[in-house]
Image (tube, rainbow, N blue to C red):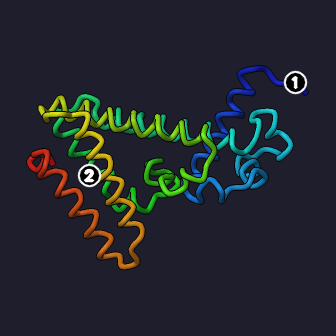
Amino acid sequence: MRYDAEHRERTRAKILKEAAVAIRAKGPTGIGVAALMKGAGLTHGGFYAHFRSKDDLVAEAIGVMFEEARNRFDRSRADVDPRQALSDYVGFYLSSMHRDARGKGCPVAALSGDMARLEPESRERFGQGVATLAAWLGKALSAHGVPEPEAAGRSMLAELVGALLLSRAVADPRESDAILASGAASIRARYRLEDAQ
């Protein structure tokens, strides 16, 4: 049975969405094509109608992850004062909910440790996503009057990711919560966002 182009695109999007969740949760090397296709409600044989290889799928899924992150960031800023939007984003990023939702969280935190071992196409997509996310933060910081907003955006992203990764790595739940809280407080103080909460 032949399917139209629209059906093919919906199926591809479904596979990519399933892959994005699985890659965040298990890492790019922790997923298998058969299990991924089964999770998407499809047969293993249909995989190659959509992707050249698993590496191709991973690169495409990384793009989807950053698109989801961009949409989340845009929603957090919609019709909100720039200071409030930044404070809200810091609060979301360094929350126990985000820490515990590995399958839905930020692709930078989920994939940073794996990038050096992936193919150049995946690393390129990841690099583009990191640069774009840092630029969004820089733009928001610029609207708030922060000097050198591009550098500040990169620095803020690094601190957000670092705090989230550390909070996920420690075994003691109280220490994990303390890392999130102190990271958020430090960022808010540095950019004068405390009273925007």
The residue where tag 1 is placed is: 2
Label 1 secondary element = loop
Say whether residue 101 is left or right of residue 123: left
Label 2 secondary element = helix
Q: Nearer the viewer, residue 151 or 89?
A: 151
Residue 36 appearing in the image: yes
Answer with mark 1 or mark 2, whichever residue precedes in sequence. 1
Residue 86: mark in rendering: none
- Residue 179, x across and y down, in percent: 27, 67
Q: Residues within 10 Å of mark 2 (few under 14, many from 20)?
A: some
Q: Nearer the viewer, mark 1 or mark 2?
A: 2
For the residue marked with disc 2, what is the amino acid?
Gly
- Residue 16, x across and y down, in percent: 64, 40
Residue 22 appearing in the image: no
Q: Residues within 10 Å of mark 1 (few under 14, many from 20)?
A: few
Residue 91: mark in rendering: 2
Q: CA distance from mark 1 to mark 2?
A: 48 Å
